[in-house]
Amino acid sequence: MIKGDTRVHSLYGSPVSHSLSPVIFNRTFEKLCLNSTYVPFEVSKDKLEDAVEAARTLGFDGFNVTMPHKTTILYMLDRLDKTAEKIGSVNTVARTKRGLVGYNTDGEGAIRALRSYGFEPNNKRILVLGAGGAAKALVHRLSKDNNKIRILNRTLDKARQLADDASGLGRISYGELDKNTWENSLHDTDLLVNSTPIRTSALVSQLKIPLNKLKDTDWVFDLAYDKQSEPIPSGSGTISPLEMLVHQAALSYEIWLDETAPFALMRSSLVDYLGKDWK
Ligand SMILES: NC(=O)c1ccc[n+]([C@@H]2O[C@H](COP(=O)([O-])OP(=O)(O)OC[C@H]3O[C@@H](n4cnc5c(N)ncnc54)[C@H](OP(=O)(O)O)[C@@H]3O)[C@@H](O)[C@H]2O)c1
């Protein structure tokens, strides 16, 4: 029950109506009898600054940030942790004595999801579609290890920028996201990460790429989860975006509550709500 002293967490984005983060957090808070709540807010680009000021004024304990605000919000916060600063993207904000601090849990959340499927992201050939906030977090994290990463994006300059900014052992190349470049980049791919908001089955159809061209790709990892995907004929299978969603949420929980997250409970909260497991 919401009371006078309930701790408020929220989500800022546009759109947010499809988001499953409120389900994960609110069901977990309820099961643990925590006096906390998680409220999604539809925030347009021109209202983000007002929304951040509202979080300060109203004393929110923390909030998540999703499309399209992950980069813009950098300049509205008081501090950034090292990872968020390096990649230039924030998905979690915590209220601290030193003001609002921005973090990014997407990269680590994605790695934990990959490992839960038995995929160890080292010495792998990885194709990343998209160069937005989520791609930045993933490429930053994946390039720490000895992976061969190719980034394809609709806007070539953003792919170039992301490739230039990444550092570490990873070897990075980039190109434009079009039919020919994608088909030519698919050879022997261990992992295809699709960080665009369009599911892979829809994206290949838009670009007129036959779906069976993906059969030599070992794993396919769509980050978007708002629409159903057709089955992809990849080697080992598909990594669910919902597994990443729960992992990145658990990392946000740890930042806000400063304690180990109840991962199994958070995951089962979502599974129960959906009525089925995704693995
Ligand atoms: N599962 C999870 O836990 C999780 C976590 C984070 C994000 N996500 C999802 O990942 C997706 C991307 O999020 P984001 O924060 O990275 O968004 P973003 O910063 O807005 O970046 C979107 C990227 O997708 C590209 N794109 C957009 N529409 C496209 C289209 N029609 N065709 C080809 N490329 C297109 C953009 O290309 P341009 O540069 O050319 O505009 C950009 O590179 C969203 O669906 C989000 O919900 C899921």
Image: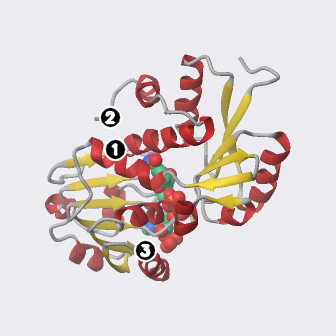
Spot occupied by residue 237 in the image (x, y as percentages of width and height): 20, 48
Residue type pointed to by label 3 = Ala
Residue holding disc 1: 240
Element marked by disc 1: loop
Mark in the foreground, 2 or 3: 3
Q: Is mark 2 on a helix, strand or loop?
A: loop
**Could you tell me how far apart the alpha carbons at marks 2 and 3 are, in whole angstroms?**
32 Å
Q: Which residue is the site of mark 2?
A: 278
Residue, x 56% and y 37% (percent of image)?
Answer: 253
Q: Which residue is drawn at 55% across and 42% down?
A: 252
Dot 2 alpha-carbon crowd within 10 angstroms: few under 14, some 14 to 19, many 20 or more: few
| Residue behind mark 3 | 166
Cα–Cα span, label 2 and label 1 = 7 Å
| Mark 2 or mark 3, earlier in chain | 3
| Image height of 52 relative to 164, above or below | above
Q: Do the residues labelled 2 and 1 touch (CB within 8 Å)?
A: yes
Query: In the rendered structure, which disc, 1 or 3, sits on the residue that comes first in sequence?
Result: 3
